[in-house]
Every structure is written in structure tokens, then in C-alpha cells.
Amino acid sequence: MDIKKVVVIGSGTMGSGIAAHLCNAKIPVTLLDLTTEISEKARDRIFKSKPPLLLDKSKIENIKVGNINDNFDVVKDADWVVEAVVERIDIKHNIYEKIFKFRKSGAIVSSNTSSIPIKILSEKLSSEEKKDFCITHFFNPVRYMGLLEIVKNENNDLNKISSLKKFCEEELGKGAIVCNDTPGFLGNRIGVYAMQVAMTEAFKFKLSIEEADAIFGRPMGIPKTGVFGLYDLIGIDLMSDVLKSFIKELPKTDEFQIVAKEIPLVKKLIETGYTGRKGKGGFYRMNKESGQKILEAINLKTGNYSPVKKINLDLGDTMNLKDLKNLKGSLGDYSNKVISKITKYASSLIPSVTESKNNIDEAMRLGFNWTVGPFEMADERNDEIKQNYLDNSLVTLRRIKNNKMNYLKKFNSSANYYYYEPNRYNIVEFKTKANALDSQSMEMLKLASDNNLIIINDSMQFSAGVNL
Ligand code: NAI
């Protein structure tokens, strides 16, 4: 199955992001919305987006726009129709009825829904139509988030799902993971669970939010916003809606139910307009006192704010799971508890949510920007539980790196050069500050470039550029 033309219906945040990314892959795409004016505005937003959704702004005209009444004919030529309209089942059902009337035989139709099960989305489709229908759940912003979840239904033509996955990986550069029709699919189920564990355990261990964020951040290989910072960024009210939906959809016995219970302080923050960065503030707030801006953090016990305290754990500014494991006191106990709960929960989702541990690790890396996923964390920490969880036959870049004896071929002060399976891949890892490139790193790259070359590193920044 060749995907040569795509139509995206719904030109909001996600539809416009998907159209822009298809344009990046040089795939002709048409963006339809209720009116052409709405899709034209979406194209303007794509043009002005920061960080840019387009690789090359001069290609903006390759995204055609139109409306669902006058221009629906374009669906007849499309090999793939992506639905990205508002999250309302009645609207989605109406759109599918129309798409399946117009689409050419065999064309794929998919939804970008983040929460509606495929069972419900496809309930009005015939078995023949169901063969070509699936969920393609992109993350926002589409160009920059590596994860794409593909959710299939029981009637899917599996060859078609495989070729869609291949297209999304090879042409769109996504890490496409096929998962089952379960609430929150894969990334959000574990990502939101992890956030809730990090939050509820912070209350239990009586940590300050600065302490919790200092642990559930860089040392764990998680973006430095931590958990409370991330809550503020996403929106505390939005997170509360997400949790309500999980509580409703998941079985009463699911561990998620325990960590998703409403927290009185969170309820109060939402009610008083402290919904995060978009509101008056959240767990953190910027207080303007006598013309000065002071960043303040909330006290989880009293709900009062005071100036943010810097936490110095002496763990460096990149992932450091081994030293974190040995950290003493309540901060160490907190990190061990959080990691073990996440790993345990993640392992309980195999095979009901996805088939492999690798899929879970990949979902957390690509969808939540974790340096490693939960099973790789257990591996790195050398946790005793790891044997239960980690597939020993899996060859990860981390394992190659940790097994220097076998794989390290050359090194200098700026880079390591490994090779894995001679004649297949060479691997170069930068190791300067901020991974800045100098003559030594270039030397290793030059030596390694006689073969397929993979460049890796563990830092938050891939490389700060050339060290001038
Ligand atoms: P949005 O509200 O930004 O855009 C929705 C668009 O659909 C609007 O432009 C609206 O005019 C259009 N629309 C409404 N009814 C329509 C119809 N009958 N025909 C054509 N267009 C119609 O929504 P957003 O955020 O882009 O979400 C779209 C889908 O993607 C939803 O299913 C959502 O759950 C999902 N999603 C959203 C993510 C996000 O971060 N915003 C992330 C992943 C999935």
C-alpha cells in the first residue's frame, strides 16, 4: 500500500500539526475544516509557529486547504484520511459516515483521538470498513514528539497496519507503536500514572515540591520540569479531567485508581483559578512584589507560598540512577519507591496493553522525553527485580555502552567509538560538556563514518554545536 496523498479533517492544534509534518515529508496533503476560513487560519498558524512546525516555510503552499462541504471530493483521491476534529463522538461518527461514502476503496481512515476507545469510534462501521480503520495517536507538537501510537480493532487488515506503521516510521520519522484498545493507550497510561505516583509519594514522604522535582527530574532521566512543574505546564484542571476519565474507564482494581484519587489541595487550586502557568499560578507561581519577580513554591501541607529553595543533590545534571539508588534519607526512599512502583505497574500492562517491554520503554522516551524507560531504569540500577522484567535478548544502545569491554573500539577525551556487529553499525557517543563538538569528536566521527553510523548520548541536549 502506497501513501501518496493524504487528507486531514480538522485543522486545530493536532490536524494542523499533522498536515505540516506530512508536508515536511513531501506528501501532498489537504486540510479540511468546517469552513475554508478556519483551515486558512490554521495554515497561517503553521507558518508562524514557534518552534516551527515546517522544516521549510517556503513549502507552505503544498498544504492545500478547504472545507468539508465544498471540497470533500479530495477524499476520493486520498490514500489515507486522518480525522482530527474535536473530541466528540457524535461529530466523529458523522464525519466517518461521510468519509466512508467518499473514500476510494482500501484507503486507510484513522482518528487522532486521545481518549475514545476504537470500539466506540468504529461501532457504526461495517466489518469491511473496519478493516481499514484505526487510531493514529500523534503527540503535540507533532513535528517534535517522536511517539505515534497506532491502535487497531479486531477486524483490521494487519498487512495494512504494518504498512502504515512502516510509512509513519520511514517517511514521518516517528516511533510507531502498535497498542491495544485500552484507556489512555500506552504512553499516557504509564506517563500519567508515573506523574501521579511522583505526586502522591511526595505527599506521603512529606517532601517539598522542589525536592520532589529535583528527584523526579534530571537524576531519573526525566525532563527538569519534574512532576509539579509539568502539572503547571499541562494545566492542573486539564490533568484533573484526564484523571476523571481514567477513573471512569479503568477497572476498579487497577492500581491507577489509587494514585488518581482527588487531592484536596489540587481541588482547591483549581477552584481558586490556580490552574498552572495559564492561570494565576499553580504549584509554582511568579509573585511580583515591589516591582520584583520572585518564583515561589507551594507548601503541600499548608497551601502557602514561599520563595523557591534550590535543592542540591550532588548528582550532576544528567541521569544518575546508580547514585540516586544509594541516596540516603527520605529523598532516596522517595526515588526508590517511585521507580519501583512505575516499573511494577508498567510490567503489569504486558501483554494487555502492549506486547513488549521495549514498546513501553520506547513510548516513555519518545512520548515523554525520558532518557530511558522504566525497564531500562531497572536495568541501569541493577535492580534485583530486573530479571523479572527485562528481556535479556534485547540489545539496547545502553547495554552496548555499558558493556565497553566487548564493544568499545576507540576513544579519546571527547567521544567514544563502539561497534556493534562489525559491518553493520558503528556507534559514536559524545562526552564533552553539553556535547559540544571539537576536533577530537570530529576525529572519532571521521573514523566511524566508513559504515552506517549511529550517534548517541544520554544528555538532555544532543549537542550544543561546535565549540568555538
Ligand atoms: P482543536 O479544538 O484544536 O481542533 C479541532 C478542530 O476540529 C477545530 O478546528 C474545529 O473547527 C474542527 N471541527 C469541529 N467539527 C468539525 C467537523 N464536523 N468537520 C471538520 N472539522 C471540525 O482540537 P485538537 O486539540 O487539535 O484535537 C483534535 C483531536 O486530537 C481530538 O480528538 C483530541 O482528543 C486529539 N488529541 C489532541 C492532543 C492535544 O494535545 N491537543 C494530543 C493528542 C490527541
Image: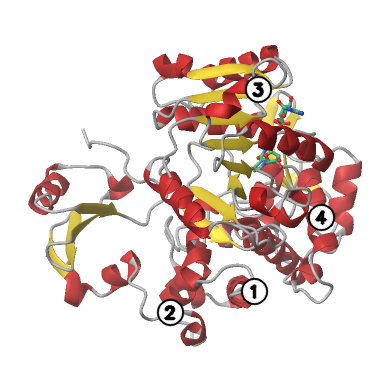
Classify residue 74 by image quadrant. top right
**Amino acid type of disc 3?**
Phe
**Amino acid type of disc 4?**
Ser
Q: How crowded is mark 1: few (under 14 residues within 10 Å), some or many (20 or more)?
A: some
Q: Is residue 414 left or right of residue 154?
A: left
Could you say where residue 370 lies in the image, as x and y percent from the top left? 50, 57
**466 vs 50, nearest the viewer:** 50
Q: Could you tell which of marks 2 and 3 lies nearer the N-terminus?
A: 3
- Secondary structure category for the residue under label 1: helix
User: In the picture, which quadrant includes the N terminus?
Assistant: top left
Q: Viewer-nearest of labels 2 and 3?
A: 3
In the displayed structure, would residue 362 be above or below residue 139?
A: below
Could you say where residue 249 lies in the image, as x and y percent from the top left? 81, 62
Question: Which residue lies under the disc numbered 2?
Answer: 391
Q: Viewer-nearest of labels 4 and 3?
A: 3
Q: How far apart are marks 4 and 1 (CA)?
A: 19 Å
**Amino acid type of disc 2?**
Asp
Q: Distance between the residues labelled 3 and 1?
A: 45 Å
